[in-house]
């Protein structure tokens, strides 16, 4: 309600994006209910290009509609880019560079570790999980570089090596949790593993970043017209 009073145009756009997301969720839920399944919806968006080029792996008609869905998501991204460009003071200092890298790393590590925990779906449509995730990370990072003042150097081979080491550590952590050891013993075993995981994440964050950011920030104060 507050945003509606301050900027009704932006409020309406948020309302339309919420409508899009509700439609996506409803559409997928109806399709998946046929099989009593729940899938990684973020992955389905990323898999659009592969499935379009390899229709023989479209195991259910729902895959035919991802092109329009992904166009919705692209428009949402364009809107958020426009919002950020309208407030360049939040993108042009050292704090913004640190937060941008932190945000990107959080997303990339979470996706990579989660996807590597369950590769059955990827393999079912003939995708190599790690190769595909790196493709998504690189393309996402290039898009992010258009607006964020600094991004991670994900195309440096060392970045992937760090992610792979995180996967190994994460697998060991999961294995500890599946043992019959007492809780205090499990926790003791987890300590060095968690320390190793944090060390790898920190090392990835501290890799020399790629300076980026939009070059077309407005040099004037925009006039809002309602």
Image (tube, rainbow, N blue to C red):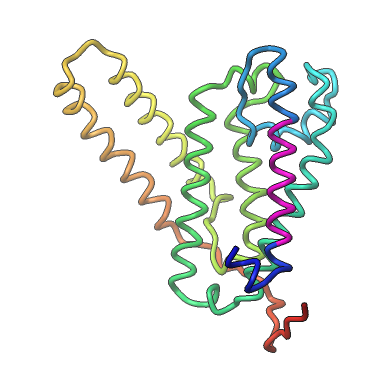
Count of all numbered marks drawn on residues in the image: 0
Please tell me which residue lies in front, 125 or 7. 7
Q: Is residue 117 left or right of residue 34?
A: left
Which quadrant of the rendered structure holds the N terminus? bottom right
- Quadrant of the rendered image containing residue 30: top right
x 43%, y 41%: residue: 162
Secondary structure character of the magenta stretch overall: helix
Q: Is residue 14 left or right of residue 52?
A: left
Q: Is residue 17 magenta?
A: yes
In the displayed structure, 57 sits above or below 65; it is above
x 77%, y 34%: residue: 48
x 51%, y 41%: residue: 160
In the displayed structure, 114 sits above or below 182; it is below
Residue 166 at x, y = what percent? 40, 36
Residue 112 at x, y = what percent? 52, 36
Give the magenta-colored segment's residue range.
12-26
- Quadrant of the rendered image containing residue 88: bottom right
Which quadrant of the rendered structure holds the C terminus? bottom right
Q: Is residue 157 magenta?
A: no
Please tell me which residue lies in front, 173 or 71. 71
In the displayed structure, 150 sits above or below 90; it is above
Q: Residue furthest bottom?
A: 220
Residue 7 at x, y = what percent? 67, 72
């Amino acid at each position: 309600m507050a945003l509606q009073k301050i900027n009704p145009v932006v409020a309406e756009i948020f309302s339309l994006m919420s409508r899009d997301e509700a439609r996506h969720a409803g559409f997928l839920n109806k399709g998946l209910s046929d099989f009593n399944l729940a899938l990684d919806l973020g992955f389905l968006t990323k898999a659009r290009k592969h499935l379009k080029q390899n229709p023989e792996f479209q195991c259910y008609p729902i895959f035919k509609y991802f092109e329009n869905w992904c166009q919705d998501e692209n428009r949402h991204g364009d809107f958020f880019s426009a919002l950020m460009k309208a407030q360049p003071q939040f993108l042009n200092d050292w704090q913004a560079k640190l937060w941008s890298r932190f945000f990107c790393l959080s997303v990339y590590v979470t996706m990579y570790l989660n996807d590597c925990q369950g590769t059955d779906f990827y393999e079912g449509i003939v995708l190599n999980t790690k190769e595909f995730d790196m493709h998504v990370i690189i393309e996402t990072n290039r898009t992010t570089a258009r607006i964020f003042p600094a991004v991670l150097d994900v195309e440096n081979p060392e970045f992937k090596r760090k992610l792979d080491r995180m996967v190994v550590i994460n697998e060991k952590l999961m294995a500890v949790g599946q043992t019959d050891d007492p809780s205090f013993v499990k926790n003791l075993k987890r300590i060095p593993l968690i320390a190793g995981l944090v060390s790898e994440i920190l090392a990835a964050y501290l890799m020399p970043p790629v300076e980026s950011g939009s070059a077309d920030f407005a040099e004037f104060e925009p006039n809002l017209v309602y």
